[in-house]
Amino acid sequence: NASDVSVDIVDIALPGSPRLLKRIELRALGAGINSIDVSAHNLVAVALEPEDKTAPGTIAFLTPAGKVIRTAEVGALPDMVTFTPDGRRLLVANEGEPDCYGPGCTDPVGSVSVVTVLPLQPELPVAHIGFEGVTVAPGVRVFGPGASVSQDLEPEYIAVEGDSAWVTLQENNAVAELDLA
């Protein structure tokens, strides 16, 4: 429930008659929900964007019963979350979308946050992978007026295979490959 900032737990044992079991309110952690994923270890990750989309976002980690057990701060506008196949890490596509272009505007950098979730610690380690110093290939769209490459590359989705992740940069008509090792 993106705009309601809540997550529903639904019993789908009878697919034709789904039954709401519980609604988890997350408004205290963010202004909107952009993505949810569940790990092989039954850990639920919820990407929450802040009221100011240019500020750092939050990932809430829940049990399958809906109890919030940890949170982690990630980059601006967390747009999509996905666990690595082994469930040890969560990858977050932080879009870093500007609020506008020109004087007085804020244009945060796009990034990928890597949250180490296993072993589960009181404070989850978060690494941020940005695009500072990256040279883009010919044909990659960089178009934000006055924006640097790191500001203009805006991660949208992530696919993971082994130690590699592919990040779509939708507005740029490009894909970035990350070496997770």
Image (spheres, rainbow, N blue to C red):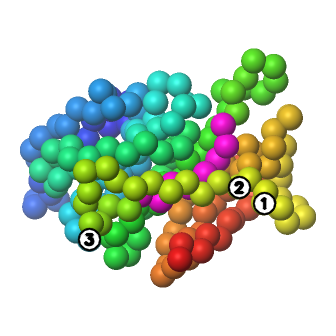
Q: Earlier in the sequence, mark 1 or mark 3?
A: 3
How far across and down, in percent of the image, does residue 29 sit? 33, 32
At x 17%, y 37%, the residue is 23
Q: Amino acid at mark 3?
A: Ala
Circle 3 sits in a helix, a strand or a loop, which is it? loop
Q: Is residue 116 magenta?
A: no
**Which segment did they paint magenta?**
108-115
Residue closest to the far top: 104
Circle 2 sits in a helix, a strand or a loop, which is it? loop
- Left/right placement of residue 68 relative to residue 143 reads left
At x 26%, y 47%, the residue is 70
Q: Amino acid at mark 1?
A: Val
Magenta stretch, main secondary structure class: strand
Above-or-below relation of 127 to 96: below
Frontmost of labels 3 and 2 is: 2
Mark identifier at residue 131: 2
